[in-house]
Amino acid sequence: MIRIFSHYVHRAALRSMLFDLALALLVAIGAIALQVGSIDQAMPLAGRHVMSFAACLFVINSASGLYEVAPMGSLGRACARALLVLLVALPLAYAIFGLLPPDLASRSAVQFSVMAGVSALVMRRVYVSHWATVPSGRTRILIFGAGPAAQVVGKTLKAADPNAHIVGYVNGPNETASTVPAHELLALNGSLTETAARLNVDEIVVALTERRSGSMPLRQLLDCKLSGIKVYDLNSHFEKTLGQIRIDYLSASWLIFGDGFNQGVLRTIFKRLFDILSATVLSIVSAPVMLVTAVLIKLESPGPVLYRQERVGQGGKPFFVTKFRSMRTDAEKDGKPRWASTNDSRVTRVGNVIRRLRIDELPQLFNVLKGEMSLVGPRPERPFFVEQLTQEIPFYAVRHSVKPGVTGWAQVRYHYGSTVEDSQEKLQYDLYYVKNHTLFLDLVVLLETVGVVLTGKGAR
């Protein structure tokens, strides 16, 4: 993993992005050079077209999830994503390179050459994601611990990172019972340092369920680190690998003495300027969509087009969020707040569509312009649920140290939450965002939000 502006990016994903970006540039430049006779003549002629297209293709591929390190699921799902990319990228390529000077020898040949190159690039990405994992390039990981905590680490690594290879588990001194498979337990022949060196270990994850005095061989772990082996504690491992801070193994001291939570004046100013600019542009671009949505809501059912609901904002300060009405006006006629659920009978037909496409969230852009919300941040919850969740979930109030967002890290990483357990899972992503939020992470969230909107993932 590589840390870029406090956010962890997998090396394999970064390599794939850069490789595809370079390949797209070469394909486009090569196609033009074949028509004009040389690269020297091609660059000044079509430089801005090539760069614009490469940037658009990068955004489309990233938003579609083609660079996800975790397996994309079935081959059918991967092909569906590739088809979605091609449906957007091919017309875009045709349009951008259709703006080349009309006196170019064969402008249509350039257009179709680039389209063919893009198709090959996307199909290659599907192949690499499913069949081209290189065993020699996998990270060799030793887990120090053999209890429930180590079992959770092993399970998440196998599910989330196909480039991770667990060489085995080492029982901690004070762990009386092992919950990991017996055949994966390693016997220490010599010190931990010697064992790690013999197995060519790249990383050690310390995942001890029992951490009383004497349970951790600090000197040996230090020797491992000094010899070039990366050593991570449990919380840092989940932060790095899954982009979350797990609260079941979290202590306040780790949050206090660790890095992150940089909420200085400069960061606040840049985030506010970014919010104003982005919300203004999005409001203008989405105005026709909002107008059509308002008409459809009014035609389907009586009642207001918009609804305002009290939510909890930064510092626990209440505010009223504005959204398109997607439920019947009598959705909570008894006055008792309740979570939305899958196939909720209170949702109207128009409401079901705008929820799936996240169109119901668009009026929150005006909350952003007013300064009550940010474009990216934790989801704002109702006071009733905040009071309940604060009592039941440790560290829940930490998420209120930043402005709530129209979209957020938890929203693009986890489906819509309708239980206390779901809220606990989403909090782990919110804590990661609050700890590591930067403009770079905001851009990553916005890219992934595009993918969520296109696929309808997590809508209720």
Image: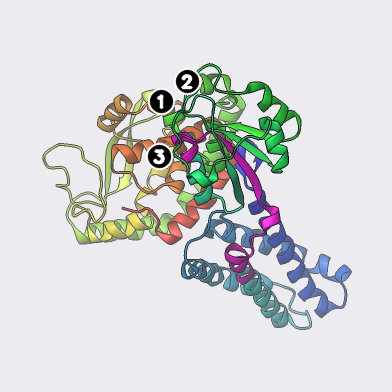
In space, the residues marked 3 and 2 are separated at their CA atoms by 19 Å
Instruction: Determine whether label 3 and label 2 are within 8 Å by CB.
Output: no
**Of tags 3 and 2, which is closer to the observer?**
2
Residue 22 locus on image (x, y percent): 74, 61
**Secondary-structure class at tag 1:** loop
Density class for disc 2 (Cα within 10 Å; few <14, some 14-19, many ≥20) is: few
Q: Which label belongs to residue 14?
A: none
Image-quadrant location for residue 6: top right
Q: Residue at x 42, y 31 (%)?
A: 248
Closer to us: 163 or 77 = 163
- To which residue does mark 3 refer? 426
Horizontally, is 54 left or right of 258 in the view?
A: right
Instruction: Determine whether label 1 and label 3 are within 8 Å by CB.
Output: no
Taking 334 as reference, is 362 above or below it?
A: below
**Secondary-structure class at tag 2:** helix
Horizontally, is 306 left or right of 147 in the view?
A: left
- Counting residues from the N terminus, which is met first, the one under dot 1 or under dot 3? 1
Q: Residue furthest left?
A: 334
Horizontally, is 223 left or right of 376 in the view?
A: right
Quadrant housing the N terminus: top right
Taking the magenta stretch, the answer to whether it contains residue 131 is yes
Closer to us: 202 or 286 = 202
Instruction: Determine whether label 2 and label 1 are within 8 Å by CB.
Output: yes
Taking 354 as reference, is 391 above or below it?
A: above
Amino acid type at mark 3:
Lys
- To which residue does mark 2 refer? 252
- To which residue does mark 1 refer? 395
Residue 349 locus on image (x, y percent): 24, 61
- Which segment did they paint magenta? 123-151
Q: Can residue 379 be seen in this snapshot?
A: no
Amino acid type at mark 1:
Phe
In space, the residues marked 2 and 1 are separated at their CA atoms by 9 Å
